Amino acid sequence: MNFLNRLERKIGRYAIPNLMYYVVLMYLLGVILSFVNPYFYYEHLCLNVGAILQGEIWRVITFLICPPSAGLLFNLLMMYLYYSLGTTLERTWGTFRFNVYFLMGILGHIAAAFVIYALFGASVPLTTYYLNESLFLAFAATFPDMVFNFFGIIPIKAKWLGFVIGAQFLYHFVTGGMISRIAIGMSLLNFVVFFLMSRDYNRFSPSEISRRNQYQKAVKQSRELHRPAKADIVRMRPRSEGPLHRCEVCGRTEKDDPSLEFRYCSKCAGSREYCMDHLYTHEHVTEDNGEYKE
């Protein structure tokens, strides 16, 4: 999108590199907290709009520590999975675009919670479920032919898993109530904007990425092919600087005496140079036989 390109040129330097590293650290904190006090998150940290309006504004950030799964082992596996997906997308899209995508997901969750509260007066504690699923949908749309080993043995392409997740969301959107529709629609708005309304989607397709990589590789090989050999580089190096001026009579140069001045004689054949001591006293060289004459 042209707007996103302009925005990147203006504020792209503020993007957070390796964003998923910090996100996974927050998930890990949530896992530890769930073992210490499983109720603390919902009592003090979740996205509760009623509590936010009463001054607990930290909830718009702390709701992100909700771990992606249940149980220590599954949480560790899912954190590793989402970290891999996120870092791959960041390397493919660029740090700024990935930051925008993830931030849009966060803002979508917050907006959905406030809209539901405004319409129904209910505080729905949205977790990071839709945010994580939007990350997987983005990966499936960018790398549809990437293969995952389901349960470690069943190979499934990312696009089929993406279709399953999308079908599940569509089913809940159609059969669920208005609250579910608002939560799903606004929480996944980042995916809609990036992949259904973006005019430069092909820029992130695997075929386009492969084409750019092949082009850069060909350019590098061409440079290596036309790079001069080491021996040629040695031959191209300038020789040690010698004297620029030398008197034809006495042989002195500017290196012998920096104060010496030299002139060319207009009466001598060729370009013959003399110091000021011999410019007017030397014997001129004839043009015919190179002999001196008076």
Image (spheres, rainbow, N blue to C red):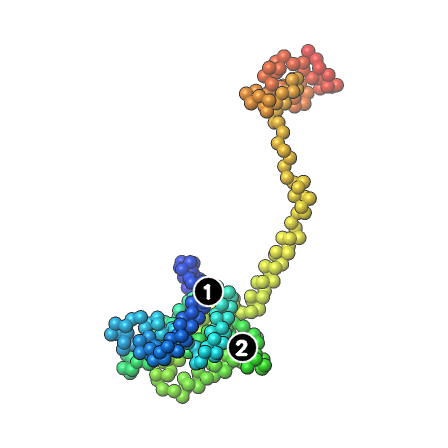
Q: Amino acid at mark 2?
A: Ala
Up the image or down, 205 lies above or below 39; here it is above
**Residue 207 appears left or right of 136:** right
- Please state which of residues 138 and 2 is positioned toward the viewer in this rendering: 138
For label 1, the crowd category at 10 Å Cα-Cα, with few meaning under 14, some 14 to 19 and many 20 or more, is some
Residue most toward the front?
36
Percent across and percent down for residue 80 are 49, 73
- Please state which of residues 191 and 16 is positioned toward the viewer in this rendering: 16
Nearest to N terminus: mark 1 or mark 2: 1
Up the image or down, 81 lies above or below 214; here it is below
Name the secondary structure under disc 2: helix
For label 2, the crowd category at 10 Å Cα-Cα, with few meaning under 14, some 14 to 19 and many 20 or more, is many
Residue most toward the right?
289
Percent across and percent down for residue 184 are 39, 80
Is residue 59 among the parts visible in the rendering? yes
**Residue 282 appears left or right of 118:** right
Quadrant of the snapshot with the N terminus: bottom left
- Residue at point 40%, 58% (across, down): 10
Q: Amino acid at mark 1?
A: Asn
Is residue 130 among the parts visible in the rendering? no
Report how many numbered discs are placed on residues in the image: 2
Label 1, on which residue?
18
- Residue at point 63%, 33% (across, down): 240
**Residue 264 appears left or right of 10:** right
Label 2, on which residue?
158
- Residue at point 37%, 83% (across, down): 180
- Residue at point 54%, 72% (across, down): 143
Residue most toward the top?
294
Quadrant of the snapshot with the C terminus: top right
Percent across and percent down for residue 40 are 33, 77
Q: Nearer the viewer, mark 1 or mark 2?
A: 1
